[in-house]
Image (cartoon, rainbow, N blue to C red):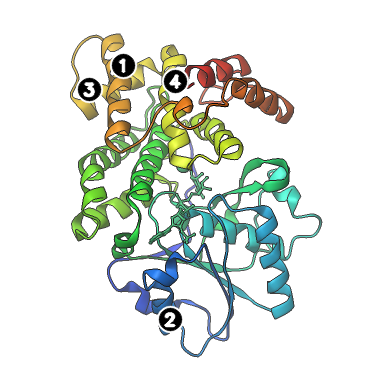
Amino acid sequence: MLNFELYNPTNLIFGKGQIEKLATLVPKEAKILLAYGGGSIFKNGIYDQVIQNLKGFDIVEFGGIEPNPHFETLMKAVEVIKAEKVNFILAVGGGSVIDGVKFISAAVHFEGNPIDILQKRLLIKENAMPFGTVLTLPATGSEMNSGSVVTIQATQEKLAFGGSAMFPKFSICDPTVIASLPKRQIQNGVVDAYTHVMEQYLTYPHEGFLQDRIAEGILQTLIEIGPDVVENPTDYALASNFMWSCTMALNGLIQKGVPSDWATHMIGHELTALYGIDHARTLAIIAPSLYNVMFETKKEKLAQYGRRIFNLTGSDGEVAKEAINKTVEFFHTMGMDTKLSQYTNDYDKTADFIVNRFDERGWKGLGEKQLITLEKVKSIVEMSY
Ligand code: NZQ
Ligand code: ZN
């Protein structure tokens, strides 16, 4: 197993009614920026619950953080924080609001131009404003990790950053919040979490036996509950396992001591930046092509995945191929279209555009063995058309 450090300071508070603990979690005397998205929290009662449980606190509200949060919007929140002398941020929302708050937290005290945090992919280790979250959409794991993805609208760039100061102080994860989610967002959550596990699992055989088994457990749970939770989001057993699987998929645990890939995400982010396709759906478009193009590097792990997750039998090559088909089948069951042409007619230059961008950024070898060259990226994207 590879050496690793495990640092995760987020206090995760999980379960029905846990929002009642909010007042005990926010620092006393805090002046809070309550950050939220497009207003779903007003319709499903989460806003009322938050306000009710923060009686006595001084609160300034900042709404309108969009899905795939924009740098431009987040900078407005930074101004509000400075003008209002806020000293704590509460994110109430899904991955976009939480990621947005991470950026705001990093930008408030940043010396220099905060756009560098994104464009230079800076590691934020200190000087961040403390923040907590109330999760409303299980998917990204952002509630218990230190990563964030922000879009610069002006340049259509969707860029990731993070650092040890970007962990939430606490996250309240009440599975009942999923009752108001549109089906599409539940489907997205399942597929995003599934792909997070795949990015950290589907590499090459290694000695992280326990990590493999935990990863497989998350995949199996998502396959077991995914289709049902879409239809029955008020079933607490389904909702709670869905939410916990999403957190576990990307809170850093299964990544420790093992190689990881992340190229599906890197390419997928470009499709969101270019066409506005939901994050999870970009992964369902790219992942199968990536597994096919990188078949030789990933064959052994694909075979392990096929045998353990889908009970397939046969030679490594046969099982590995069929495992890709089974993955696509699962994505379809989860309501995903898996070809770019199903989302846009304007796709024929996409591969060249992405390759040029990666070239400019110096991303010439992605994946667990840096074998996903620009040529391979081109093949992957073209195969996804
Ligand atoms: O904006 P509001 O009104 O809140 O509506 C949202 C939004 O329209 C709605 N929603 C959220 N909770 C709801 C609800 N509607 C009804 N009831 C509820 N309880 O759902 C829509 C999508 O929300 P969003 O936050 O965008 O979705 P998600 O959680 O999937 O986050 C996606 C973002 O996270 C990034 C993605 O790239 C994307 O920008 N990611 C962040 C990661 C991380 N920080 O570790 C890793 C991921 O791989 C991912 O890249
Ligand atoms: Zn993701």
What residue appears at the point 31 percent right and 16 percent down from the top-left corner? 320
Quarter assignment of residue 352 = top right
| C-alpha span from label 4 to label 3 | 20 Å
Camera sees residue 1: no
Q: Are marks 4 and 3 in contact (CB under 8 Å)?
A: no
Mark 1 is surrounded, within 10 Å at the Cα level, by few (under 14), some (14 to 19) or many (20 or more) other residues, namely many
Q: Are marks 4 and 1 in contact (CB under 8 Å)?
A: no
Secondary structure, mark 3, is helix
Q: Amino acid at mark 4?
A: Ser
- Closer mark to the observer between disc 4 and disc 3: 4
What residue appears at the point 43 percent right and 68 percent down from the top-left corner? 41
Q: Earlier in the sequence, mark 2 or mark 4?
A: 2
Q: Earlier in the sequence, mark 2 or mark 3?
A: 2
Mark 3 is surrounded, within 10 Å at the Cα level, by few (under 14), some (14 to 19) or many (20 or more) other residues, namely some
Camera sees residue 302: yes
Q: Nearer the viewer, residue 215 or 374?
A: 374
Which labelled disc corresponds to residue 178?
A: none
Q: Earlier in the sequence, mark 1 or mark 2?
A: 2
Which labelled disc corresponds to residue 307?
A: 3
Q: Amino acid at mark 1?
A: Ala
Q: Relative to residue 107, is residue 245 drawn left or right?
A: left
* Residue at the spot of label 1: 320
Does 346 appear above or below 86?
above
Secondary structure, mark 4, is helix
What residue appears at the point 26 percent right and 15 percent down from the top-left corner? 319
* Residue at the spot of label 4: 289
Q: Amino acid at mark 2?
A: Thr
Q: Earlier in the sequence, mark 4 or mark 1?
A: 4
* Residue at the spot of label 2: 24
Q: Amino acid at mark 3?
A: Arg
